[in-house]
Amino acid sequence: MKLLRAWTTLTSLTFRRLLWSASTMMVMLPLSGCLLLVLRLYYHRGHHEYSFKEFRDFSEFMILVFASFVVPICALAYGTASLGGDREDRTLVFLLVRPIPRALVLLAKFTATLPLVLGLVVGSFWLYCRLSGEVGQMAFSLYLPALLAMTFAYVCLFHLFAVAFRHSTIIALIYALFMEVLLGNLPGIVKRVAVNYYGRSIMYSAGAPEGLKSPDPEWFQPLEPETAMWALAGIAVAGLLLALIVFSRREYRDLT
């Protein structure tokens, strides 16, 4: 009972700290930029409504901008700060000296982070789809499973970064900007180190019946959606398990 109370208290405190933090301001910038892009490019003044001309246009925006850049930034901002913030502020030592299992501490941090990131991703995605008319409503049901799986994988992965590296935010930024953006768009199998490769495979497959075409096969060969979904699930589970192992065994000498 005491452990349950400790878990709920730590989850609640972490959620509130993350919500009212600089991370929220950081993620609002790309989310607002995407919103302005939607309003600027697809607002028809004569009809007084928001609408994308074609389903393909909205799909490319979702895949190349939102899923490939905004989603990892949202997960990065909170995933590394949930535990990395305590480590940078040297307040993590107060958690470690408490009679609470380290695994429970990390799970509480993860539990506080995941709904916050999912809320931002799903909420902003719903808003963009709502403003985009019929094509957006069609895309919402098609692309939501891929975005949920990507978000879950990113949050688990960035928690691993938070427990494994001292300056985890910098490492995560390098991964998000280099591994995800650069390597994720290179030809060959090297792109499989990027989470967004699997998410894009699912999204291209989901949008294919509506006329969405995959990129040139020389640059992008999508996996089967079932395989890509299992890959994302594997990344998420492996990332969280490794984070639990590292956090339970590592001595954080930089806290003293």
Image: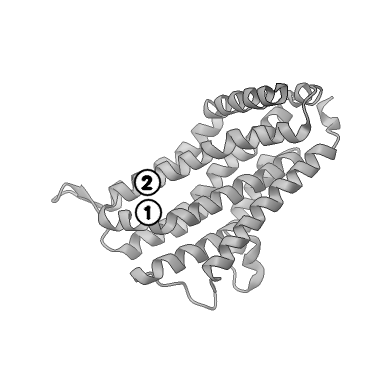
Residue in the foreground of this view, choosing between 60 and 8? 8
- Name the residue type under label 2: Trp
- The correct choice, above or below, for 207 with respect to 168 in the image is below
Residue 173 located left or right of residue 37: right
Residue position for label 2: 126
Q: Give the class, few, some or many, for how many residues have Cα within 10 Å of label 1's Cα (few <14, many ≥20).
A: some
Q: Give the class, few, some or many, for how many residues have Cα within 10 Å of label 2's Cα (few <14, many ≥20).
A: some
Query: Do callouts 2 and 1 mark residues in contact (Cβ within 8 Å)?
Result: yes
Report if residue 96 is visible in the image: yes
Residue 35 located left or right of residue 6: left
Q: Which of marks 2 and 1 is nearer the N terminus?
A: 2
- Quadrant in the picture for the C terminus: top right
Residue in the foreground of this view, choosing between 139 and 25? 139
The residue at 47%/72% (across/down) is 215
Which percent across, then down, holds residue 127?
35, 44
Residue position for label 1: 140
The residue at 49%/57% (across/down) is 146
Distance of mark 2 from mark 1, alpha carbons?
7 Å
Would you identify the image quadrant in which residue 124 lies?
top left
Q: Which residue lies furthest to the front in this view?
A: 1
Which percent across, then down, holds residue 51?
25, 54
The residue at 54%/71% (across/down) is 224
Helix, strand or loop for disc 2: helix
